[in-house]
Image: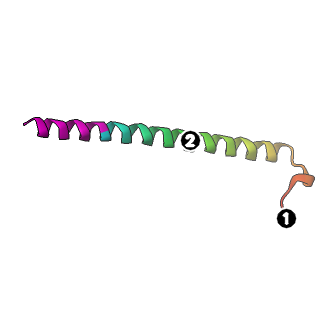
Amino acid sequence: MAVVQLMNFDDETKRRDLRKMKTVATGFLVFASVVYLFCRWQESKCPNPAHRSA
């Protein structure tokens, strides 16, 4: 019976860690999206031909 409880504990730990990692990954994605949109907004507001890519 102790082995089953230990397995349940490991499953819960893995599930909690996976949820935490998904939250961190989603946070990074949202942050990168905000930075990208901000840069696009700045570019459209004041375009500088010297900084345009080829």
Q: In the image, what residue occupies the spot 75% across and 44% down? A: 39
In the visual, does 42 lie left or right of 14? right
Q: Horizontal and vertical percent for residue 7?
A: 19, 41
Residue 34 figure quarter? top right
Q: Name the quadrant of the N terminus.
A: top left
- Comparing marks 2 and 1, which lies closer to the viewer? 2
Magenta-tinted stretch: 1-13
Q: In the image, what residue occupies the spot 79% across and 42% down? A: 42
Residue at the farthest left position:
1
Q: Horizontal and vertical percent for residue 24?
A: 49, 38
Q: Within the magenta stretch, is there residue 3? A: yes
Q: Horizontal and vertical percent for residue 4?
A: 12, 40
Distance, label 2 to label 1, CA atoms, is 29 Å
Q: Name the quadrant of the C terminus.
A: bottom right
What residue is disc 2 on? 28
Query: Where residue 54 is drawn, which disc sits there?
Result: 1
Q: Nearer the viewer, residue 22 or 8?
A: 8
Q: Mark 2: which amino acid?
A: Phe
In the visual, does 19 lie left or right of 41? left
Q: In the image, what residue occupies the spot 50% across and 43% down? A: 25
Q: Mark 1: which amino acid?
A: Ala
Q: How is the image coloured?
A: rainbow
Q: Is residue 21 above or below residue 50?
A: above
Give the SS element for disc 2. helix
* Lower sequence index among marks 2 and 1: 2
Q: Nearer the viewer, residue 27 or 18?
A: 18
